[in-house]
Amino acid sequence: MRVEDFIKAVEEAGFKFITDNITNGKPEVILNTHALHIFLPKDGSISLEDFIKEQGEKLLQAVMKLREYKEEAKRVPLYEHENLREIIESYIEEFSKTLGIKPGGISITRMGKSWLRCVNNLFIFSEFLKYLPEELIRHVVACGMCYLAVKKRGPELQSLLKKLDPDAERHKHMIKVYKVAIERKERL
């Protein structure tokens, strides 16, 4: 794929195309709701032409998928749960009865990229969960509880998640759509 064709496709999809140099030796790609940023090594060891030749199709697929999420995000309502902690705690209680485990504690804070982190048996939730419908908050808590039970990502975690959340695939999709809607609202 030629660089000119790649840039044209990215821009026609509604994204800015930005390229810059980076000091370390590995290329980096950042795709957000308004731009595709490609950072290439300052030493010139990888050219934009070579990078697009190697990664262009894969990057365009990601751009097109994000464009779909952006369109869908225009139609989803953002909630304002004032009782987020209570909602989370009720789902932890529900899942702990099935799994026989509980996190050592929970905290809610502003996080830009993820919905939940598990650190030393503690759950740290993003305050942006307040914008999600309760079924998606439940999905995020289910993911955390599965991770707590299994201690690693992979097929065992996914199998357990399917048992706790039979509609997990649809919820994963909707989480991505809501992430775009929240990013637009919060300008993350």
Image (cartoon, rainbow, N blue to C red):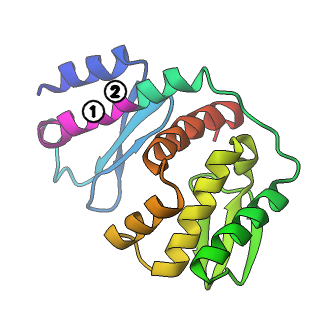
The residue under the point 75% across, 61% down is: 88
**Residue drawn at x 45%, y 79% as measured from the top left:** 150
Q: Does the magenta run of residues contain 62?
A: yes
What x and y, as percent, mark residue 187?
66, 36
Q: Is residue 175 above or below residue 147?
A: above
- Residue 21 is left or right of residue 103, and the answer is left
Give the number of the disc on residue 64.
2
To which residue does mark 1 refer?
61
- x 58%, y 40%: residue: 179
Q: What residue is rendered at 51% in x and 31% in y?
A: 33
Q: As shown in the figure, which amino acid type bears the numbered disc 2?
A: Met
Q: Identify the secondary structure beneath mark 2.
A: helix
- Residue 106 image-quadrant placement: bottom right
Specify whether residue 170 is painted magenta.
Answer: no
Whether residue 176 is situated above or below residue 161 in the rendered picture: above
Q: Quadrant of the C terminus?
A: top right
Q: What's the CA distance linking mark 1 and mark 2?
A: 5 Å
Q: Residues within 10 Å of mark 2 (few under 14, many from 20)?
A: some
Asked whether disc 1 touches disc 2, contact meaning CB atoms under 8 Å apart, the reply is yes
- Please tell me whether the stretch drawn in magenta is mainly helix, strand or loop: helix
Q: Which residues are magenta?
A: 50-65
Q: Is residue 47 visible?
A: yes
**Residue 91 drawn above or below residue 147:** above
Residue 63 x, y percent position in the rendering: 35, 31
**Left or right of residue 86: residue 134:** left
Give the x, y percent position of residue 34.
50, 28
- Disc 1 secondary structure class: helix
